[in-house]
Image: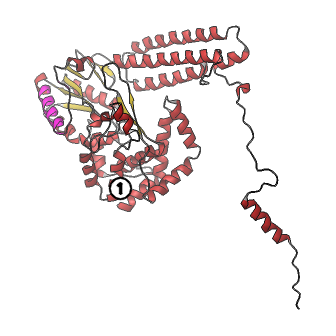
């Protein structure tokens, strides 16, 4: 087992699969820096993966060089902590996940499939857990909710688990992994992959943000390939106990909704779940917390008549549509793109340093955002919401078109090209030729080679006797 798992991790099949996932995710990022890094890594991806494989074989691979950053979440809210990991770290973490959960189908070639670890597969088979499971998604969660409502379970309580990723008990997760795998080295590697090695700890401490990140044996970095698996392992007992006594509890990582036939039965289940989570060092929101209600962290009532925001949707007995928060976030992202587009075009028109991204590039990026959002909410039944958002986008596109038109009106051709985002050959920066060693300035190796060649070309002289 030891050799098999470690060998499986460093195999070309697993590393190639892992890189494909990391690459796809990176290229889909809206961060130009991330896309650039992925493209650079891709130029020699075979050699890079071979290097990782050799490091894993020699047991010298380390999850180093990670940086903690905080993303503002709005006034009065704690920022969101994210750990930015090097590409190699992401590939190996994804590879570990592939080994743990398995891949391929019955029809796949023997080298293209792996059954995974039975205990991990058992966790992932939990029907009402729909986050971080490759066979399930938001759509499955919505189906489970619809199924429960159709069965008469219309009373609900919904809550987030507070600061969830920083509260995941790593000792419990590591113990589960150790019991599931008789492979000490692989277990140690999984333990290292679950921890975060931040290089900017002092900076985060000085700004008072370090406490937001995982600490020692508590917490997993949000965004890690293994964070969802760790969450599902930690909450396996919660899932089992909360889906009992006529209650359906659908959970997507740290968000859950309990549904039952009566309000009292749902309240009792919530109280029980709250106690169970408290024993794990976690907490949920109180029914009297009006701030949590306003922030969308907690809600209760009759879902058929009142509706609720769950899994990004507004769900009721009458319709299913993107929640108001999801719509606001989408419009804000689009509006920010239009703002950035105007800024870059204005810089290009005035001859100031700019990103090189003009009118056309921003429209392509807008299409990327729209397509992604439309797929995330493709299960919407209230299509009038899409029509309303399309009208908003159409208005902003026309506004951007007029802005670009005003900038290039009567402008020289080169300004028109820059504003439109079409590369000018004359804007190509000068690139001097590389320096080549001058005549008579030979390197040591060249001099040695020249001497050797001269010796070979010398005629062989007969040895004269005395």
- Give the vertical position of 135 relative to 370 (above or below): below
As drawn, the residue found furthest toward the bottom would be: 466
Majority SS type along the magenta span: helix
Check disc 1: other Cα within 10 Å, few if <14, some if 14-19, many if 20+.
many
Residue at 41% over, 24% down: 378
Q: Quadrant of the C terminus?
A: bottom right
Q: Position of residue 231 (x, y in %)?
A: 29, 39
For residue 140, side relative to residue 299 (left or right): right
Classify residue 56 by image quadrant.
bottom left
- Residue nearer the viewer, 41 or 136: 41
- Give the vertical position of 80 relative to 123 (above or below): above
Q: Position of residue 50 (x, y in %)?
A: 52, 54
Q: Quadrant of the N terminus?
A: bottom left
Q: Secondary structure at mark 1?
A: helix
Q: Position of residue 32 (x, y in %)?
A: 53, 30
Residue 125 visible in this rendered orientation of the protein? no
Q: Which residues are magenta?
A: 266-286
- Residue nearer the viewer, 290 or 122: 290
Residue 246 visible in this rendered orientation of the protein? yes
- Residue nearer the viewer, 151 or 61: 61
| Residue 284 is one of the magenta-drawn residues | yes
Residue at 35% over, 23% down: 73
Task: Give the labeled residue for mark 1.
Answer: 186
Classify residue 401 by image quadrant.
top right
- Residue nearer the viewer, 386 or 409: 409
For residue 160, side relative to residue 418 (left or right): left
Residue at 71% over, 29% down: 428
| Residue 120 is one of the magenta-drawn residues | no
**Which color scheme did the rendering employ for the protein?**
secondary structure
Residue at 49% over, 57% down: 54
**How many discs appear?**
1
- Give the vertical position of 345 relative to 36 (above or below): above
């Amino acid at each position: 087992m030891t050799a098999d798992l470690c060998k499986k991790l460093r195999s070309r099949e697993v590393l190639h699969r892992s890189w494909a996932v990391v690459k796809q995710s990176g290229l889909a990022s809206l961060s130009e820096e991330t896309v650039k890094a992925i493209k650079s890594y891709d130029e020699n991806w075979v050699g890079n993966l071979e290097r990782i494989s050799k490091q894993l074989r020699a047991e010298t691979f380390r999850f180093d060089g990670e940086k903690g950053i905080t993303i503002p979440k709005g006034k009065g809210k704690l920022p969101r902590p994210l750990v930015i990991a090097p590409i190699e770290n992401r590939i190996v973490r994804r590879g570990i996940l592939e080994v743990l959960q398995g891949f391929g189908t019955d029809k796949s070639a023997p080298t293209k499939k792996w059954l995974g670890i039975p205990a991990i597969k058992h966790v992932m088979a939990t029907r009402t857990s729909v986050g971080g499971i490759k066979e399930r998604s938001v759509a499955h969660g919505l189906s489970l909710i619809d199924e429960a409502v159709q069965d008469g379970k219309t009373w609900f309580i919904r809550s987030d688990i507070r600061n969830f990723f920083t509260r995941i008990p790593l000792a419990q997760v590591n113990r589960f992994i150790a019991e599931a795998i008789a492979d000490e080295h692989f277990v140690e590697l999984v333990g290292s992959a679950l921890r975060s090695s931040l290089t900017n700890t002092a900076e985060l401490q000085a700004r008072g943000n370090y406490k937001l990140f995982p600490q020692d044996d508590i917490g997993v970095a949000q965004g890690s390939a293994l964070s969802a698996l760790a969450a599902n392992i930690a909450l396996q007992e919660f899932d089992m106990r909360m889906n009992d006594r006529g209650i359906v509890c659908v959970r997507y990582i740290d968000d859950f909704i309990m549904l039952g036939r009566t309000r009292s039965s749902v309240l009792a289940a919530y109280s029980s779940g709250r106690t169970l989570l408290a024993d794990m060092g976690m907490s949920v929101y109180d029914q009297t917390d009006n701030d949590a209600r306003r922030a969308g962290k907690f809600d209760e009532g009759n879902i058929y008549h009142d509706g609720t925001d769950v899994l990004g949707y507004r769900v009721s007995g009458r319709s299913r549509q993107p929640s108001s928060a999801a719509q606001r976030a989408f419009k804000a992202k689009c509006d920010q793109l239009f703002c950035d587009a105007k800024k870059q075009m204005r810089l290009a028109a005035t001859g100031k340093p700019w990103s090189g991204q003009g009118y056309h590039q921003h429209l392509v990026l807008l299409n990327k955002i729209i397509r992604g959002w439309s797929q995330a909410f493709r299960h919407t039944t209230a299509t009038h919401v899409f029509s309303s958002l399309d009208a908003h986008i159409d208005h902003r596109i026309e506004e951007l078109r007029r802005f670009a038109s005003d900038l290039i009106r009567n402008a020289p051709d080169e300004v028109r090209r820059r504003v439109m985002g079409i590369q000018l050959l004359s804007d190509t920066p000068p690139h001097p030729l590389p320096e080549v060693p001058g005549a008579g300035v030979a390197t040591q190796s060249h001099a040695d080679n020249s001497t050797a060649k001269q010796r070979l070309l010398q005629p062989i002289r007969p040895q004269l006797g005395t």
